[in-house]
Image (tube, rainbow, N blue to C red):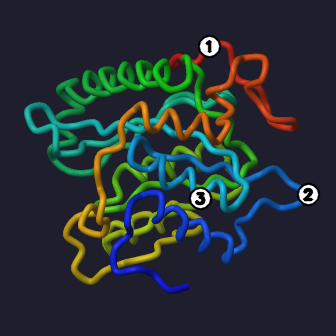
Amino acid sequence: MSLPPCFADRREAGQYLGQRLVELGYARPADANPPLVLALPRGGVPVAHEVARAIDGTLDILLVRKIGAPGYPELALGAVVEADASGNGPHTVINEGPWVQRAVESGAFDAERGRQLGEICRRQQRYRQGRPVVAMAGRCVIVVDDGVATGATMRAALDAARTATASRVVAAVPVGSAEGLDTLREVADDVVCLNTPVSFGAVGAFYLDFTQTTDDEAMSLLREAHCASMLPPHAAWRRGEPPFTANPLAR
């Protein structure tokens, strides 16, 4: 498959990525549940929308929040991932290092984790009327973003899918740094990346249009894909898939 030097936008990148996943055999099997395509919002949603179309997968979002250091929010101490509909509670990843140890001992880590769980609950209300992400157990889960730099957020999402007993865990991105992708291979069954440049820089450098995806745009794409978690409660799951739990709040 021939790739352009830069993707026009996230949706074009998703079309190329979806084609690659079809070539690798990730299209929906005729006799099995469709793959579960989980977008990391918001930039991952346009990419994942096209991926789900290409492989006939079920689209949803997976809410992940970085846990930053006190006074240095750009320094990641870890991440927390939302609970899913099968009853798995929020999944927390704690990074290694002296900053992290001090934050844990002082209680700052737990305090920031609590704030980020609150933001996850707010976004659950915004995107899904308070419902959790669909259950991952026994599913082929493909986690999609618009690119990978350090890989910290994507790694937390993959780790959560693994903990939720997904049958196969796949990371899929249009572009990524070699270092970031290496960290994903430690937790994923497969890592699919279209472009791994020698000189990476930033994800946005590989898109002609890297305008920030808004909440409204992301929600519009999810509705267009008939995302199960955005449908009315009586129609919120496909045949053969488990319904949502009554209480979506973090446990």
Q: Quadrant of the N terminus?
A: bottom right
Lower position in the chain sequence, tag 3 or tag 1: 3
Q: Residue at x 70, y 55 (%)?
A: 140
Q: Residue at x 47, y 64 (%)?
A: 12
Q: Nearer the viewer, mark 2 or mark 3?
A: 3
- Kindly indicate the quadrant of the structure image that contains residue 241: top right
Q: Which residue is mark 1?
A: 247
In this picture, is 38 found above or below 183? above
Q: Residue at x 77, y 30 (%)?
A: 237
Q: Secondary structure at mark 2?
A: loop
State the separation of the CA atoms marked 3 and 1: 30 Å
What residue type is disc 2 on?
Answer: Asp
Q: Which residue is mark 2?
A: 31
For residue 136, side relative to residue 82 (left or right): right
What residue type is disc 3 on?
Answer: Val
For the residue pair 113 and 217, the one nearer the viewer reads as: 217
Question: In the rendering, at what x and y percent does residue 32 appear?
Answer: 86, 54
Q: Which residue is mark 3?
A: 51
Q: Nearer the viewer, mark 1 or mark 2?
A: 2
What residue type is disc 1 on?
Answer: Asn
